[in-house]
Image (cartoon, helix red, strand yellow):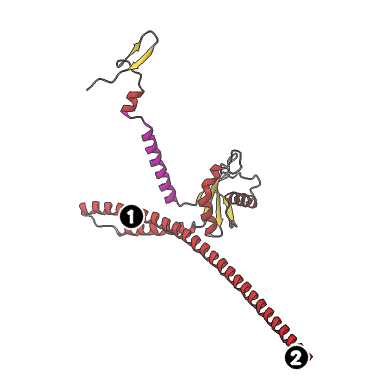
């Protein structure tokens, strides 16, 4: 009888240990599942970030291709105008002009590809030592101010001849497109820095080709002309701004002027 009870107790203990082992295994499996889920979510976040970055770069490339396409269309229109003149004058179309147009467009596209990772920064004080390392540190400080994550800058150099009392532009070669794109997207934040901040008068832009600089200058001139045109008063505004003499009179001895409606035409 005692032996039966002992065996029964031993069996119960074995069952309890088995149940405890099952619980531990279930708990471990649950922890493993959570770890796998966390790892999967992290990989998903990384992938989404890569897709968003690639999309941003693609949008930038599309814009550059659109600008280049506009340039090509403008040059084609110019060539068509010339060809019309040649036809009217019974002159054959010169293939050299066609070849020159194709060569110009190809050179422009290559120049834009060469500059697609570059930035131009101006407003950074030029060190007396003419040290590239100091300029590179200054560029990295600007990018940090713009909250560019892990800025990758490979090379910087000053453009143009050194002049006393004037800091030259800095051309910056970025190690990847993310650094360049992020800097351009955040560049406008520099002007919102508090007065006295060392980077408040620093400006960041793309490294443009000569054609792009000409187009940019033309756009600024057109914008300035439109603003000046809208700032000029119209005839009605000039009429209302002029002091009334024939269409008003003084009331009493107080020197008050009473405006009367203008006479009908």
Q: Dividing the image into 4 quarters, which one contains the N terminus?
A: bottom right
Residue 98 in percent (x, y) is at 32, 58
Residue 234 in percent (x, y) is at 33, 30
To which residue does mark 1 refer?
73
264 relative to 91, above or below: above
Give the number of marks: 2
Residue 206 in percent (x, y) is at 49, 51
Distance from Cα at disc 1 to Cα at disc 2: 101 Å
Of residue 260 and residue 222, the one placed in the foreground of this image is: 260
**Residue at 36% over, 31% down:** 232
The quadrant holding residue 245 is top left
Q: In the orientation shown, which residue stands out farthest toward the front?
A: 1
To which residue does mark 2 refer?
4
**Highlighted magenta segment, given as a residue range:** 209-235
Which is more N-terminal, label 2 or label 1? 2
Of residue 147 and residue 39, the one placed in the foreground of this image is: 39
Using a 10 Å C-alpha cutoff, classify the residue at mark 2 as few (fewer than 14 neighbours), some (14 to 19) or many (20 or more): few
Q: In the orientation shown, which residue stands out farthest toward the right?
A: 2
251 relative to 96, above or below: above
**Does the magenta portion include 254?**
no
**Residue at 23% over, 55% down:** 91
Of residue 55 and residue 164, the one placed in the foreground of this image is: 55
224 relative to 14, above or below: above
* Camera sees residue 89: no
Residue 264 in percent (x, y) is at 23, 22
């Amino acid at each position: 009888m005692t032996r039966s009870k002992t065996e029964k107790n031993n069996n119960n203990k074995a069952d309890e240990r088995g149940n405890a082992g099952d619980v531990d295994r279930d708990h471990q499996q649950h922890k493993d599942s959570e770890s796998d889920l966390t790892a999967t979510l992290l990989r998903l976040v990384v992938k989404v970030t890569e897709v968003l970055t690639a999309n941003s770069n693609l949008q930038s490339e599309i814009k550059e291709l659109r600008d280049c396409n506009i340039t090509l269309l403008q040059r084609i229109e110019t060539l068509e105008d010339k060809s019309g003149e040649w036809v009217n004058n019974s002159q054959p179309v010169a293939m050299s002009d066609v070849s020159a147009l194709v060569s110009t467009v190809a050179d422009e596209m290559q120049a834009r590809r060469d500059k697609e990772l570059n930035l131009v920064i101006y407003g950074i004080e030029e060190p007396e030592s003419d040290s590239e390392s100091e300029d590179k540190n200054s560029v990295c400080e600007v990018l940090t101010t713009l909250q560019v994550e892990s800025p990758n800058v490979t090379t910087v150099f000053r453009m143009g001849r050194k002049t006393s009392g004037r800091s030259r532009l800095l051309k910056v070669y970025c190690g990847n497109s993310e650094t360049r794109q992020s800097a351009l997207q955040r560049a406008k934040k520099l002007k919102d820095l508090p007065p006295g901040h060392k980077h408040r008068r620093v400006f960041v832009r793309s490294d443009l080709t000569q054609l792009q600089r000409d187009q940019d200058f033309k756009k600024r001139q057109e914008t300035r002309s439109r603003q000046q045109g809208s700032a000029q008063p119209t005839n009605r505004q000039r009429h209302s701004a002029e002091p009334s003499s024939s269409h008003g009179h003084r009331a009493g001895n107080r020197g008050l002027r009473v405006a009367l409606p203008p006479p009908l035409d």
